[in-house]
C-alpha cells in the first residue's frame, strides 16, 4: 500500500501510471482501411501530434517543482481535448469493431499492483482526467501557505482538483470507463465523488486559514470551520462504504476521520469564544464539552496519522481544555448558571449552521419527504375520486338542473350555447335579408360592368366597319372581330357564370324563406327562454310537492357542504406539507431516523381520518338523494320534461346547422361576385387600352390614305394637262376625318395605352358559380387576343384603371340604360 502524501496535514494524490502505447500506427491503418490511403496521408501530421501529446502528458516523468507541475497540467489538458476529437472519429471500444491492436494499460493510483488493459478510449480519458486532478492537488500541496499568495494558490489548486474529479464523475466518463470492462477502483464514480469532497474540504481549510489570519470574528470563523468539517465528514462516509472501504490504506481513513472531528471541534471552540464574549457561559461550557468529546472519540480510532496532524489536534484540545476550566471557574464563582448536559442537549431548535446540510441528513430528509408525498398523493386521489363520483351521479339524476328548471333557471349545454351566441353576434336569421340584398346589388353591378365592356367593343367594331366601307381596299388594318375574339369569349364565359350565380341566389333566397320558421328560434334572447320548464302538477292528491322539493334541496346543500369540506381538507394537507420541516431534528441527531419518521408521520393521521369520514358521509348522502330524486321525478313527471327538452335542444342544433349552411353559401356568393367584378374591371381596362390604340392607328391610316390620294392626283395632272381632274373618290371624301366620339362615353373606358393586352382570366364553363368552388379570376395569362403582329404597340404609357370617385356599387351605374345583353339585339355598324 502507498501511504498518502502529507505535508502541513493535507493530502495530495499520486498520478496513475501507464504503459507506452503507439497511437500513430493503429490509427493510420484504420484511416487507410475505413477511408483511403490519401486520407491517411493527409491526417499524418494530426496523428503525429496526438502521439506527441500522449507522450508529453502520460509517458514523461513528472518533477516535483511547481513549474514542471504547471507544464504537466497544460499537457494533460491538451491531450484530454485531443482525446475528445479522437473519440468521435475512431471506434476504440471493446463492444464494437475497434482499431486493430490498440489497447491502453493503466495502474491503480492507490494500489499500484493492480492494473487494467482495455481497447477503450473512455478508459484513457478517465485516467487523464484523474491525473489532471492529481497534479492540481500536488500544486496545492507544494504551495507555501504561510503567505497570502501561497494560500490563494493552494485554495485555487484544490478547487481545480475538485473540479477535475467532479467532471470525471458528472460527465459520465468514469461510468463509461466502468461499463467498458473491469477497471480499477480509483476510476469508479464513487472514488471520484470521494476525492471531490476531499479536495473541497482542503480548499475550504485553506480559506479558514486565511480567515483566521485576517482576524475575522469568532462566529464567522466557526461557520467556515463547520463547513470544512462537513466536507471531511462526507469524504469519510464515502471511504467507509463499498467499494472504497477495502481499497484505501487505513492511514487515509484515519486522516480524514480525524480531520472531520478536528474541524467539528474547532467550530465548537470558536463558537464558544463568541458565547464567552456575550457572557453565555453555560452555553460556552456545553459547546466546549461537545467538541472535546468529539476529539476524544476520533483520537481513539485514529491510527497511523501524520504527526503534524496529531500535534494540531492536541493543540486544539489543549486550548479547549484551558477555556473550559476558565469558563467553569467563572460560572462557579460569578454567573452560577445551570450548564445543560451534553448528552441530553436537544439542538433541534438551534439555527446554528442551518445552511450546512451533510449528504447523510439530506438523504434522510429525502426519504421522509417521499413518505409525506405518498400520503399527500394517496389522500388527494381519494378526494378527487370522491368529487368525480359525485359529479357523475348527479349528472345521471339530472341534478341540480331539474331543480333549477322548476324555479325557472333553465340552461342549455355549453357548446350549443356558444354556437347560438355566435349566430346571434353575426346578425341571426333576421339579418339574412340584408345579405340577400347585398347579393342582388352585386349581381346587378357585375351585369352592368359586362354590358358596358361589350358596348365598348361593339362601338369600336362599328367604327372600323364604317371606315372599311368608306376606303375599301385601302383600309388594310385587321378587322376588330379578329382581334377581340378572345376577350369576347371570356366575356361570354363571365355572362354565363353570372346567370348561374343568379340562379344560385334564387335558390339561397328560397332556402332562407322556407327555413326561416326553423331558424327563428335563434332570434330568441336569451335562448334559454325557448326551452321548456318543469311545471307543478295541476292536481295534487296529498299536497306534499313542496316537502319533496325542500327535502331534495336540503340534501343537495349538504352534499355541497361535503364538497367544500373536501376542498378545505386538501388545502390543509398541502399546508401541513409546506410547514413540515424536520431537518433541524435530523441535524440534531436525536434518536434513530426510523423512530423520528414514525413520530412525525403520525401527525397526518387525524386529517386522513377526516377524509375517510367525509367519503363515507358522501356515499350515504348520495343514496338518500337518489331516493328523494325518484319521488321528485314521479310527482313532477320529469320523463316528459326531459323528452321535451331534448327535442328543443335538437331543434336549436338543427337551426344552427341550417343557418351556418346558408351563411356559408352567402359568403361564397359574395366572394364570387367580388372576384368577378375585379376580373371584369381588368378586362374593361384592357378594352379601353385596345380602343385607344385602334383610334391612334385609325388616324395614322387616314393620313396615309390621304397622302396616297394626293400623290395620285398630282401624277394624273402631269400626264393629262388638258383633261379635267377627276378622282374615284368624291371631293368630300379626300380628307375624311374619324367620326366624332362621345367624349363622355370615351372617358368611361378610355385609358392611355400600356395595360397588359394579354387576358389574364380564364375559367372552365362547366364550373357552376355556387355548387362548385367559385371561378378563380387570377389564372395564368392567355395568348394576346389582338395585335399579334405588333404586340408592343399596345404596351405604352401604363396607367392603373380606377373607378370614378364616389361610385356606389350598390346603385345602378347607368339607371335607365339597357344594353344588348338584355334586349338580345346586336348594335348595327354606323354607315359613313
Image: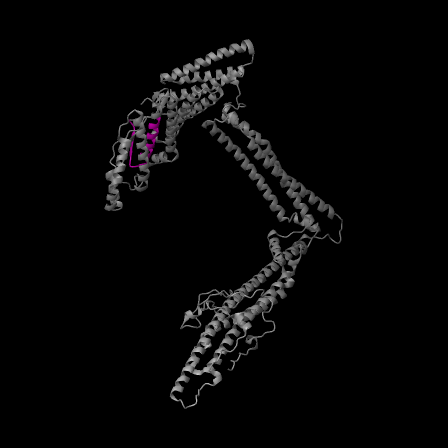
Q: Nearer the viewer, residue 237 or 470?
A: 470
Q: Judge whether 243 appears above or below 383 on screen.
A: above
Residue 190 x/y as whole percent: 38, 30
Quarter containing the N terminus: top left
Residue 229 x/y as whole percent: 44, 23
Q: Residue furthest front?
A: 721
Residue at the (65%, 47%) spot, across then down? 399
Q: Is residue 246 left or right of residue 381?
A: left
Residue 640 x/y as whole percent: 67, 55
Q: Residue furthest bottom?
A: 722
Q: Nearer the viewer, residue 650 or 319?
A: 319
Is residue 508 covered in magenta? no
Q: Nearer the viewer, residue 742 or 74?
A: 742
Its colouring scheme is one colour
Q: Judge whether 156 appears above or below 454 on screen.
A: above
Q: Judge whether 446 appears above or below 553 on screen.
A: below
Q: Is residue 1 left or right of residue 447?
A: left
Residue 687 x/y as whole percent: 49, 71
Is residue 114 covered in magenta? yes
Q: Nearer the viewer, residue 689 or 260?
A: 689
Residue at the (54%, 8%) spot, across then down? 333
Residue 771 in view in this figure: no
Q: What's the magenta bit mostly, secondary-structure-wise? A: helix
Residue range in magenta is 113-137
Q: Quadrant of residue 703?
A: bottom left
Amino acid at each position: 500500500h502507498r501511504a498518502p502524501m502529507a505535508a502541513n496535514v493535507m493530502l495530495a494524490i499520486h498520478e496513475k501510471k501507464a504503459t507506452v502505447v503507439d497511437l500513430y500506427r493503429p490509427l493510420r491503418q484504420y484511416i487507410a482501411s475505413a477511408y483511403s490511403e490519401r486520407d491517411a496521408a493527409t491526417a499524418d501530421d494530426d496523428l503525429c501530434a496526438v502521439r506527441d501529446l500522449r507522450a508529453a502528458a502520460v509517458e514523461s516523468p513528472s518533477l516535483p517543482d511547481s513549474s514542471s507541475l504547471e507544464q504537466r497540467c497544460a499537457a494533460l489538458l491538451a491531450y484530454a481535448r485531443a482525446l475528445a476529437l479522437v473519440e468521435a472519429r475512431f471506434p476504440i471500444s471493446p463492444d464494437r469493431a475497434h482499431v486493430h491492436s490498440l489497447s491502453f494499460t493503466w495502474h491503480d493510483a492507490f494500489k499500484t499492483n493492480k492494473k487494467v488493459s482495455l481497447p477503450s478510449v473512455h478508459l484513457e480519458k478517465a485516467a487523464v482526467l484523474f491525473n489532471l486532478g492529481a497534479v492540481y492537488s500536488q500544486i496545492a500541496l507544494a504551495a507555501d501557505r504561510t503567505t497570502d499568495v501561497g494560500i490563494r494558490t493552494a485554495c485555487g489548486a484544490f478547487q481545480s482538483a475538485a473540479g477535475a474529479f467532479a467532471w470525471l464523475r458528472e460527465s459520465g466518463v468514469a461510468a463509461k470507463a466502468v461499463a467498458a470492462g473491469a477497471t480499477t477502483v480509483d476510476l469508479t464514480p464513487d472514488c471520484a465523488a470521494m476525492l471531490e469532497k476531499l479536495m473541497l474540504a482542503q480548499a475550504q481549510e485553506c480559506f479558514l486559514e486565511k480567515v483566521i489570519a485576517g482576524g475575522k470574528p469568532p462566529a464567522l470563523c466557526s461557520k467556515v470551520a463547520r463547513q470544512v468539517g462537513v466536507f471531511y465528514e462526507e469524504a469519510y462516509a464515502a471511504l467507509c462504504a463499498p467499494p472504497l472501504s477495502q481499497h484505501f490504506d487505513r492511514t487515509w481513513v484515519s486522516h480524514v476521520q480525524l480531520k472531520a472531528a478536528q474541524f467539528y471541534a474547532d467550530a465548537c471552540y470558536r463558537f464558544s469564544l463568541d458565547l464567552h464574549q456575550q457572557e453565555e457561559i453555560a452555553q460556552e461550557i456545553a459547546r466546549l464539552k461537545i467538541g472535546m468529546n468529539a476529539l476524544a472519540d476520533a483520537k481513539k480510532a485514529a491510527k497511523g496519522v501524520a504527526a503534524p496532524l496529531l500535534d494540531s489536534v492536541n493543540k486544539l484540545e489543549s486550548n479547549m481544555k484551558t477555556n473550559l476550566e476558565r469558563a467553569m471557574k467563572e460560572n462557579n464563582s460569578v454567573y452560577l448558571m445551570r450548564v445543560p448536559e451534553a448528552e441530553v442537549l436537544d439542538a433541534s431548535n438551534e439555527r446554528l449552521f442551518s445552511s450546512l446540510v451533510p449528504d447523510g441528513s439530506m438523504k434522510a430528509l429525502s426519504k421522509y419527504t417521499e413518505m409525506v408525498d405518498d400520503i399527500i398523493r394517496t389522500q388527494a386521489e381519494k378526494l378527487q375520486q370522491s368529487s368525480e363520483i359525485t359529479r357523475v351521479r348527479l349528472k345521471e339524476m339530472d341534478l341540480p338542473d331539474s331543480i333549477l328548471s322548476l324555479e325557472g333557471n333553465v340552461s342549455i349545454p355549453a357548446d350549443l350555447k356558444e354556437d347560438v351566441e355566435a349566430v346571434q353576434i353575426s346578425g341571426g336569421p333576421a339579418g339574412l335579408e340584408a345579405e340577400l340584398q347585398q347579393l342582388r346589388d352585386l349581381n346587378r353591378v357585375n351585369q352592368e360592368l359586362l354590358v358596358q365592356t361589350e358596348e365598348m367593343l361593339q362601338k369600336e367594331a362599328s367604327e372600323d366597319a364604317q371606315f372599311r366601307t368608306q376606303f375599301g381596299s385601302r383600309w388594310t388594318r385587321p378587322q376588330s372581330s379578329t382581334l377581340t375574339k378572345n376577350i369576347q369569349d371570356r366575356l361570354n364565359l363571365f355572362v354565363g357564370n353570372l346567370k348561374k350565380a343568379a340562379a344560385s341566389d334564387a335558390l339561397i333566397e328560397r332556402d332562407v324563406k322556407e327555413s326561416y320558421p326553423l331558424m327563428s328560434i335563434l332570434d330568441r334572447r336569451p335562448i334559454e327562454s325557448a326551452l321548456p320548464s318543469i311545471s307543478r302538477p295541476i292536481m295534487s292528491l296529498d299536497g306534499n310537492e313542496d316537502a319533496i322539493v325542500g327535502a331534495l334541496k336540503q340534501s343537495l346543500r349538504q352534499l355541497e357542504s361535503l364538497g367544500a369540506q373536501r376542498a378545505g381538507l386538501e388545502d390543509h394537507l398541502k399546508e401541513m406539507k409546506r410547514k413540515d420541516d424536520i431537518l433541524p431534528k435530523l441535524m440534531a441527531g436525536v434518536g434513530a431516523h426510523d423512530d423520528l419518521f414514525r413520530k412525525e408521520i403520525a401527525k397526518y393521521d387525524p386529517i386522513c381520518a377526516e377524509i375517510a369520514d367525509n367519503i363515507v358521509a358522501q356515499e350515504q348522502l348520495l343514496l338518500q338523494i337518489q331516493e328523494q330524486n325518484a319521488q321528485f321525478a314521479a310527482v313532477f313527471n320529469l320523463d316528459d320534461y326531459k323528452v321535451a327538452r331534448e327535442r328543443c335542444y335538437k331543434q336549436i342544433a338543427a337551426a344552427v346547422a341550417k343557418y351556418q349552411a346558408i351563411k356559408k353559401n352567402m359568403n361564397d356568393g359574395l366572394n364570387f361576385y367580388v372576384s368577378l367584378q375585379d376580373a371584369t374591371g381588368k378586362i374593361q381596362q384592357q378594352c379601353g387600352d385596345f380602343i385607344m390604340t385602334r383610334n391612334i392607328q385609325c388616324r395614322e391610316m387616314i393620313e396615309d390614305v390621304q397622302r396616297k390620294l394626293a400623290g395620285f392626283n398630282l401624277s394624273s395632272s402631269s400626264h393629262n394637262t388638258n383633261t379635267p381632274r377627276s378622282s374615284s373618290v368624291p371631293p368630300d371624301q379626300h380628307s375624311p376625318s374619324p367620326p366624332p366620339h362621345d367624349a363622355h362615353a370615351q372617358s368611361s373606358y378610355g385609358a392611355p395605352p400600356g395595360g397588359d393586352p394579354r387576358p389574364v382570366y380564364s375559367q372552365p364553363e362547366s364550373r357552376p358559380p355556387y355548387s362548385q368552388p367559385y371561378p378563380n379570376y387570377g389564372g395564368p395569362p392567355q395568348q394576346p387576343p389582338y395585335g399579334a403582329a405588333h404586340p408592343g404597340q399596345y404596351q405604352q404609357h401604363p396607367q392603373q384603371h380606377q373607378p370614378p370617385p364616389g361610385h356606389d356599387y350598390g346603385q345602378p351605374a347607368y339607371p335607365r340604360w339597357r344594353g344588348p345583353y338584355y334586349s338580345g339585339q346586336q348594335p348595327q355598324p354606323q354607315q359613313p
